[in-house]
Image (cartoon, rainbow, N blue to C red):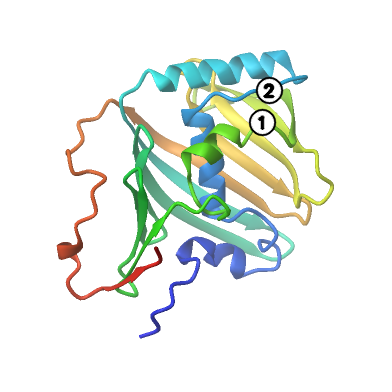
Amino acid sequence: MNKTINTMKFNRYSQNSKAGKNNLNPIGKLVFLLTVLLFSFSIQAQDKKAKDLLDQVTAKVKSYNSIVIDFKYSLNNAKENINQDSKGNVTMKGNQYMLNFMGVTKIFDGKKTYTIVPEDEEITISKVNEKDDNAITPSKMLTFFNSGYKYTMDIVQDIKGRKIQYIKLVPLSAKDQRKEVLLGIDVQTKHIYNLIEMGKKGTKTTLTVNSFKTNQPLSKNQFTFVESKYPNYYINKLD
């Protein structure tokens, strides 16, 4: 068995097509979503209405003890004939989380990240790497929106009886392969409904929250990695 752990299954959609290779991979998009869900951000010289709405979302979510989200991830590009969907879920409490996505489980206990891949019977244990674009870290979440985007209010849509207000984020860097990002917010609940990213090469990726549960009872070992549960797995300790 090859003992070298790759960037894991999270990258496989973007690796499988030219259209997706220059976009944030799925875990990167989830970082984007969790950032908005969990933290406030310093937005200066931006659309005041957009900032006010994001502040309301942040204040609402910060009042919760824990959050459990089921989501759907879609990648589409008509020109490249790409239409791929995947589902996942994430449980969060404070700066700890457990993410299940594309057959991989990722646990962060506040100090180390444990990436569990049943398909390969491999586990990677590492400390948080601030330089890793795929790492969900508290510091990255706190600073993600501080620069690099122009914020404006966008359209309002009625989706299955829900009023969804979109905020448009346009990257300021000409090198960014994303044309724009639309963040959909449920006006009534102040919860994130979806995130739509449009790439400059025609790739559209959508992260939709199917279920948003709060203050759920969690096990005291919810974010604890127990090595004995994986007797036949190869464990790769990077630190």
Which image quarter is the C terminus in?
A: bottom left
Answer with the quarter of the image where residue 11 lies: bottom right
Q: Residue furthest bottom?
A: 1
Badge 1 marks a residue whose secondary structure is: loop
Which residue appears farthest toward the front when viewing the image? Answer: 239
Pick whichever, 127 or 191, lies toward us. 127
> Which label sits on residue 43?
2
Q: Amino acid at mark 1?
A: Asn
Q: Is residue 99 visible?
A: no
Tell me which amino acid carries mark 2: Ile
Q: Residue at x 48, y 43 (%)?
A: 137
Q: Which residue is mark 1?
A: 146
- In this view, the residue farthest toward the right is 174
- The answer to which image quadrant residue 181 occupies is top right
Spatial CA distance of label 2 from label 1 is: 6 Å
Mark 2 touching mark 1, by CB under 8 A? yes
* Residue at image location 71% in from the left, 33% down from the top: 147
First in sequence: mark 2 or mark 1? Answer: 2
Residue 172: x and y in percent read 80, 38
The x and y percentages for residue 81 are 67, 65
The reply to whether residue 210 is visible in this rendering is yes
Give residue 13's position: percent from left, percent from top: 56, 64
* In the image: residue 34, left or right of residue 169: left
Q: Residues within 10 Å of mark 1 (few under 14, many from 20)?
A: few
Q: What element does badge 2 sit on?
A: loop
Q: Give x and y (percent) for residue 219.
A: 17, 39
Q: Residue at x 66, y 44 (%)?
A: 197
Answer with left or right where residue 3 lies relative to residue 10: left
How packed is label 2: few (under 14 Cα within 10 Å), some, or many (20 or more)?
Answer: some
Which residue is at a point 51% across and 22% down the rendered structure image?
162
Q: Is residue 197 left or right of residue 100?
A: right
User: Does residue 5 appear left or right of residue 205 in this picture?
Assistant: left
